[in-house]
Amino acid sequence: MAAGFLARLAGDRIEVRSAGSLPADQVTPAAVEAMKEVGIDIADQQPKVLTTEAVQASDYVITMGRGDACPIFPGKKYLDWVLEDPAGNGVASVRPIRDQIKTRIENLIAEIDAEADR
């Protein structure tokens, strides 16, 4: 959901990578449905394993409650967003998680834009 919001809200200004330390076999169906409700289609996304190379190539690394599983490199900005896992929940339970993620993504974009303006 975070990658979907970031890609939509930042456009091509920010390169988006999405991966997890323990990715599921598929994107949670309720997350797909919740994002569809706000006009973002993530149905074609496939969970990917987080690689050391992906972290090294990133300026910002956002973990969602699994920061301890992420490699640490100097010069990267690490954010750990502790959020409820949408897996196994229905769309009604995923909507508040989706909305929290959207707010955090909007704040992240503002932070990245402010850094770029300095």
Image (cartoon, grey):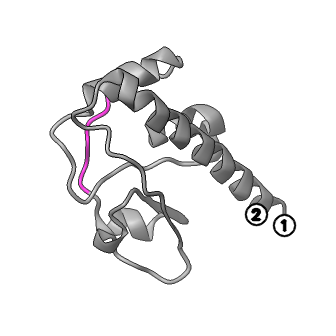
Structural crowding at the residue carrying mark 2, measured as other residues with C-alpha within 10 Å and reported as few (<14), some (14–19) or many (≥20): few
Q: Could you tell me which residue is drawn at 29 percent across and 59 percent down?
A: 50
- Place residue 116 in its image quadrant: bottom right
Q: Is residue 20 left or right of residue 114?
A: left
* Residue 41, visible in the rendered structure: no
Left or right of 11: which side holds 62?
left
Whether residue 46 is in magenta: the answer is: yes
Quarter-of-image position of residue 69: bottom left
- At x 40%, y 79%, the residue is 72
Q: Check the picture and name the quadrant holding the N terminus.
A: top left
Q: Please report the residue visible at 25 percent of the width from the left and 60 percent of the height from the top.
A: 21
Look at the image and give the residue range highlighted in magenta.
45-49
**Amino acid type of the residue tagged 2 in the rendering:** Glu
Q: In the displayed orientation, state which residue is furthest to the bottom.
A: 74
Q: x, y percentage for residue 103?
A: 62, 42
Q: Secondary structure at mark 2?
A: helix
Q: Amino acid at mark 1?
A: Arg
**Is 97 or 2 nearer to us in this picture?**
97
- Whether the residues at callouts 2 and 1 have beta carbons within 8 Å, the answer is yes
The residue lying at 58 percent from left, 31 percent from top is: 8
Q: Is residue 59 visible?
A: yes
In the rendered image, residue 94 lying in the magenta stretch gets the answer no
Q: Relative to residue 18, is residue 29 drawn left or right? A: left
Q: Residue 74: percent from the left, percent from the top?
A: 50, 84
For residue 57, which quarter of the picture?
Answer: bottom left
Disc 2 and disc 1: Cα gap in Å?
5 Å
The image shows residue 68, relative to residue 80, as above or below, that is below
Question: Which residue lies under the disc numbered 1?
Answer: 118
Q: Which mark is residue 66?
A: none
Residue that label 2 marks: 115
